[in-house]
């Protein structure tokens, strides 16, 4: 806590313009004189690490810290910590901003690193690039000098003694013994003759080889107390142990160099022959590999994805795959692998890495990429925010409805079903429907069918007015489509959207529309039509029941209170052939609807409106009705919906008749008094229920 306050004081005195925010402190080993903080860049919020040195805490170490700053600023290598910025207050403090890292020792103590990952890490920080390419000596390679970035890669720091090989007056020779715990890691020749001994020998880099041996022991077995501990194998892999011992040979001229150590690891069945190292090397040259090599690599990654460290997959492999797909395509396999690795990301990482990539790809005009995006829609759409979908992805998707390639249009329609729950009301009811109306009339039958299926599945997301204005006309037209599966899909869609229409629409618009399909030439269509019309008839019967219940409630008092004031003076003729039928159905309108019988003589319950003069009194004013019928010169057929409950009603029909117009259903007939009414058998009696199909629509 005191160190954090000290850093804050340092910032307030002279570093307010540094451009970085300090966050929590990260513990470092005791042999480091740096303080490490997590930080963020003020300009863009980018995460970073901040190394702070204060001379007040470590007197006499200023030159070492300053050398580390100079060398880090001038070095650029994948396995050296990436330098971002620095702030130096002469003789007081040094602050270095780098990529976000954590000390390797923290993961070693937690024992969360597998053996293969440890070997991979060694391969990365085997500092041959410093000795061979930079012609320099690190001089301070130890566990406290190694860090791990977000992708799991090991990075070298601790450049306090970093010195060129060819210079005689370097900091290594004068300050080599000033590093904390330097004697513990000091090679035998340095312990005997001092650091200046290196000036007179050709194998100056042997000191780094010895330090690498110490590091190998520490990462597999933990800290050592004396040099004699280093000869113990412990958990060092068998393949590595024999080569490891050559790094610790006391004679520097006989000691194995780091370059030869790496070559031994690359030999057949060497300790560096692992899938992780092979993958890491391939990624470094990914863009110069041919298509066959890339496909082989992708298959290997996909088959071994569980073997790789999660951080390596997320932050090393995934960015390389995304760059490859953006610049060279790569097809469905590469895209699927990107999404597969993307499942390992947190929501914030997905938002920063995958979402922008998806948005950029929807702007790409390559049809193969567009098809790949559409076909994999369910695999990524739930990880993307609704705002991005509505504002950036959906407008780009709409162009697919007008594409000249039918497959793109079809896949666009299918993708709508997946995305519909995330779309705004405006995009659904205003933008989307305009394009679905077009594809509903598409020349390709499969696209018309897909449009109907889409409408059936998104119907519940439409405004009620659009259900009547869009769905009913669309379904009506599609039931007449020459393509069989369009008609079947329409019937299934009608099933799925049945509850979206009110009962009056079911009776007046949809049942008359469905009825002709009952005699369709295709049996599969007829079978589906039977299921569909049964569903809509249930809605219709529900409406009838409601109307009947309402009518009974309104007229119950009228039936019991009012008696006719006059009897009919008419010729009330009831066919003798139907007298038994009248007795049977005097109380059952529903039974009459469902039972077949034939009337081959005069029509039952036919009243001559020209002669009738009955005076009828009910709770409602029916004078107008009487006036119309008494002046009518034609015959009307009145089919009783509910008859009087009196058992003597039919026998007394010639004496007097009580009418309840609210309970009657009037059917206008031709003026022929000999009209025959024939009730046919239920139309479904001849259907073969065993020959049903399995067409269903997932609602």
Image (cartoon, rainbow, N blue to C red):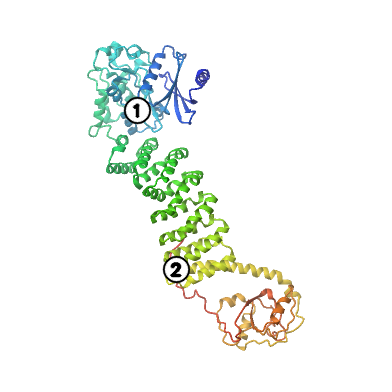
Can residue 698 be seen at all in this image of the molecule?
Answer: no
**Residue toward you, 318 or 398:** 398
Left or right, residue 405 beside residue 3: left
Q: Which residue is mark 2?
A: 525
Left or right, residue 102 beside residue 427: left
The residue located at (24%, 18%) in the rendering is: 203
Q: Are marks 1 and 2 in contact (CB under 8 Å)?
A: no
Tell me: residue 479, above or below residue 33: below
Left or right, residue 230 beside residue 454: left
Left or right, residue 248 beside residue 339: left
Quadrant in the picture for residue 154: top left
Q: Please state the horizontal and vertical placement of residue 339, each as a whole percent of the image.
A: 40, 44
Q: Gap between marks 1 and 2, in whole Å? A: 68 Å
What label sits on residue 79 in the rendered view? 1
* Residue farthest toward the right in the current orientation of the protein: 565
Mark 2: few/some/many CA within 10 Å (<14, 14-19, 20+) = many
Q: Secondary structure at mark 2?
A: helix
């Amino acid at each position: 806590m005191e160190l954090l306050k000290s850093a804050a004081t340092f910032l307030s005195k002279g570093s307010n313009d540094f451009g970085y925010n300090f966050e929590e402190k990260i513990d470092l080993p005791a042999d480091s004189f740096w303080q490490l903080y997590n930080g963020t860049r003020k300009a863009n919020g980018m995460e970073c690490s901040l190394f702070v040195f204060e001379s007040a805490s470590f007197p006499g170490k200023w030159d070492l810290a300053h050398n580390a700053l100079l060398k880090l600023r001038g070095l650029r290598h994948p396995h050296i910590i990436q330098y971002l910025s620095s702030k130096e207050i002469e003789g007081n403090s040094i602050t270095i901003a780098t990529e976000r890292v954590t000390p390797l020792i923290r993961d070693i103590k937690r024992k969360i690193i597998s053996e293969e990952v440890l070997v991979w890490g060694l391969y990365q920080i085997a500092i041959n690039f410093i000795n061979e390419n930079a012609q320099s000596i690190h001089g301070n390679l130890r566990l406290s000098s190694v860090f791990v970035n977000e992708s799991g890669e090991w990075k070298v720091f601790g450049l306090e003694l970093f010195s060129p090989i060819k210079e005689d007056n370097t900091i290594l020779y004068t300050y080599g013994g000033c590093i904390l715990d330097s004697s513990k890691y000091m090679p035998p020749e340095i312990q005997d003759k001092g650091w200046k001994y290196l000036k007179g020998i050709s194998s100056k880099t042997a000191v780094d080889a010895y330090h690498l041996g110490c590091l190998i022991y520490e990462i597999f077995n933990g800290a050592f107390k004396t040099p004699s501990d280093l000869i113990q194998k412990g958990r060092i892999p068998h393949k590595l142990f024999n080569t490891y011992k050559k790094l610790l040979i006391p004679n520097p001229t006989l000691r194995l160099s780091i370059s030869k150590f790496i070559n031994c690891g690359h030999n057949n069945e060497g300790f560096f022959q692992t899938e992780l190292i092979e993958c890491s090397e391939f990624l470094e040259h990914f863009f110069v590999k041919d298509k066959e090599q890339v496909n082989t690599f992708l298959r290997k990654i996909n088959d071994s994805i569980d073997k790789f460290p999660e951080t390596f997959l997320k932050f090393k492999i995934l960015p390389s795959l995304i760059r490859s797909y953006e610049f060279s395509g790569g097809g469905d396999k590469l895209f699927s692998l990107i999404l597969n690795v993307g499942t390992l990301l947190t929501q914030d990482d997905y938002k920063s890495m995958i979402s922008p990539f998806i948005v950029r790809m929807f702007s790409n005009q390559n049809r193969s990429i567009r098809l790949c995006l559409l076909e994999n829609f369910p695999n990524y759409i739930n990880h993307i925010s609704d705002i991005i979908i509505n504002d950036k992805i959906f407008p780009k998707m709409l162009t697919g409805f007008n594409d000249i390639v039918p497959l793109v249009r079809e896949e666009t329609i299918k993708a709508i079903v997946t995305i519909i729950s995330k779309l705004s009301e405006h995009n659904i009811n205003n933008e989307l429907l305009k394009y679905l109306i077009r594809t509903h009339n598409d020349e390709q039958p499969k696209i018309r069918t897909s449009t109907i299926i889409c409408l059936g599945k998104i119907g519940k997301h439409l405004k009620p007015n659009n259900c009547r204005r869009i769905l009913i006309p669309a379904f009506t037209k599609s039931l007449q489509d020459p393509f069989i599966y369009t008609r079947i899909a329409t019937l299934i869609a009608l099933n799925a959207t049945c509850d979206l229409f009110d009962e009056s629409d079911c009776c007046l618009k949809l049942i008359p529309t469905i009825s002709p399909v009952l005699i369709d030439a295709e049996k599969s269509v007829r079978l589906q039509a039977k299921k569909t019309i049964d569903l809509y008839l249930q809605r219709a019967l529900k409406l009838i029941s409601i109307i009947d219940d309402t009518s009974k409630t309104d007229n119950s008092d009228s039936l019991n209170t009012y008696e006719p004031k006059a009897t009919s003076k008419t010729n009330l003729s009831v066919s003798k052939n139907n007298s038994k039928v009248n007795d049977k159905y005097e109380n059952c309108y529903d039974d009459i609807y469902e039972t077949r019988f034939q009337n081959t003589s005069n029509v039952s319950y036919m009243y001559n409106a020209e002669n009738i003069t009955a005076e009828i009194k009910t709770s409602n004013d029916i004078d107008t009705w009487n006036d119309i019928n008494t002046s009518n010169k034609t015959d009307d057929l009145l089919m009783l919906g509910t008859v009087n409950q009196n058992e003597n009603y039919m026998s007394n029909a010639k004496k007097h008749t009580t009418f309840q117009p609210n309970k009657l259903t009037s059917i206008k007939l031709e003026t022929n008094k000999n009209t025959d009414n024939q009730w046919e058998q239920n139309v479904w009696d001849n259907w073969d229920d065993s020959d049903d199909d399995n067409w269903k629509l997932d609602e």
